[in-house]
Image: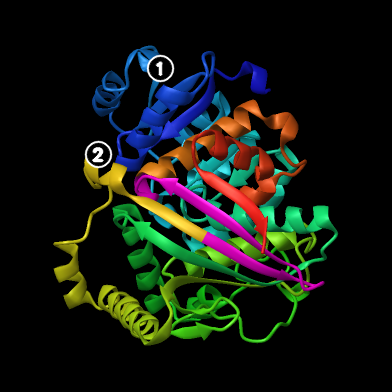
Amino acid sequence: MAAQRTLDIAVLGATGFVGRLTAAYLAQHAPEGVRVGLAGRSQARLAQVRSQLGPAAIDWPLITADSTDPAAMGTLAESSRVVATTVGPYRIYGRPLVEACANAGTDYVDLAGEILFMRDTIERFHATAQASGARIVHTCGFDSIPSDLGVLALHEAAQADGAGELEDTTLVVRGMKGGASGGTLASLTGQLDEVRAAPELRTLVGDPYALSPDRSAEPHLGDETDLRGPVRDDALGMWLGPFVMASINTRVVRRSNALQRWAYGRRLRYREAMGMGTGQAGRVKAAGLAGGVGALIAALGFAPTRKVLDRVLPAPGEGPSEQARRKGFFEIDVHTRTSTGARYVCHLAAQGDPGYAATAVMLGESALCLVLDRERLPDRAGVLTPATALGTALADRLRGAGQTLEVVRA
């Protein structure tokens, strides 16, 4: 069926901010012969985007398609081997495309960091995608590729050394510079609104195993709630503060473990945090960060203060200048202790604003990986994660694109 399709990769949302960056990345880095098309609601805006991508994209097809139109999404899925979508909030706009790809056996990648949307697609379309052979892969950007591939790399290193299973594992953001994505903020506020309107969803959103394929089979390891206040970690020798993306990343990593029959270990305790330094200064920074994150979430959940924040925070489709994107970066360490007492650290880093420039590389390479590296991919279909769908093939691609992903024994 794939041989009859006219496109290898369709970029849906190509006129949006991250969509344009992803299209530009593919125009510069997709090998000759990879057939890319741009999809969105406006033919004129798609043509304008294509005109700015250079000679490699001059003949790329333009597909007028509304993400809320099931028929249009069906046609797009049936004509493409892979669809990469940046159209969010996904809870509002994403379901028709996921359903179409699951039915058509079309691979799919997105930037969704929305627990409720992902839980919905798992329940509705996982079995359908398994039957059709489709890989539905959420969170193929800064959330949650560094987290997911970092833990996978630690697992593979420990297995190669015969060092046992992963146990206490902590992702620490050592440094990061970049702006919050308007799409990410829209997804966050949408989830806050939905939880407030339907309080029963609060339990689901707060469940550390919210994305598990079998919640009843998950281990009982005590309190695994995300970090909310300052914590001194003696093993790491530093103060930790909450990392705002932990609420999605940790659940993705736990789903990866479960989809692999808990290959990382039944006693994997995984958390994410911001590294805030040592001593009293580190404690003060961690406390300040915790207070700031809590205040922001509270302000976004309260209508009067949200109206004020909406005036200064980026809206969907908006983003920083090219110069600001170039100056962005992230540096992350994922620390683990195994069941034999061995310690490893996975270093992850990239130049470029994490939510924009680095994310465009990750999404673009995820799509290329599905097209070009199929013989290296795990033999798995359904609603998956980056680690379980793309694994080491994607890690190799990201290294080739200049991003760092390396494991050392501590």
Question: In what quadrant of the picture does the N terminus appear?
Answer: top right
SS state under label 2: helix
- In the figure, 269 relative to 187: above or below? below
Residue at horizontal 53%, vertical 46%? 404
Residue 243 quadrant: bottom left
- In the figure, 11 relative to 212: above or below? above
Q: Nearer the viewer, residue 139 or 152?
A: 152
Q: Is residue 200 magenta?
A: no
Mark 1, residue position: 60
Q: Which of 120 and 231 is in front in this view?
A: 231
Amino acid type, callout 2: Glu
286 sits left or right of 143 in the view: left
* Mark 1 or mark 2, earlier in chain: 1
Residue 285 quadrant: bottom left
Amino acid type, callout 1: Trp
Question: In what quadrant of the picture does the C terminus appear?
Answer: bottom right
SS state under label 1: loop
* Picture mark count: 2
Mark 2, residue position: 322
Residue 311: horizontal and vertical position, in percent? 14, 62
Residue at horizontal 42%, vertical 35%? 12
Residue at horizontal 46%, vertical 64%? 173
Instruction: Give the magenta part as a residue range.
Output: 333-356
**Can residue 232 be spotted in the picture?**
yes
Residue 36: horizontal and vertical position, in percent? 47, 22
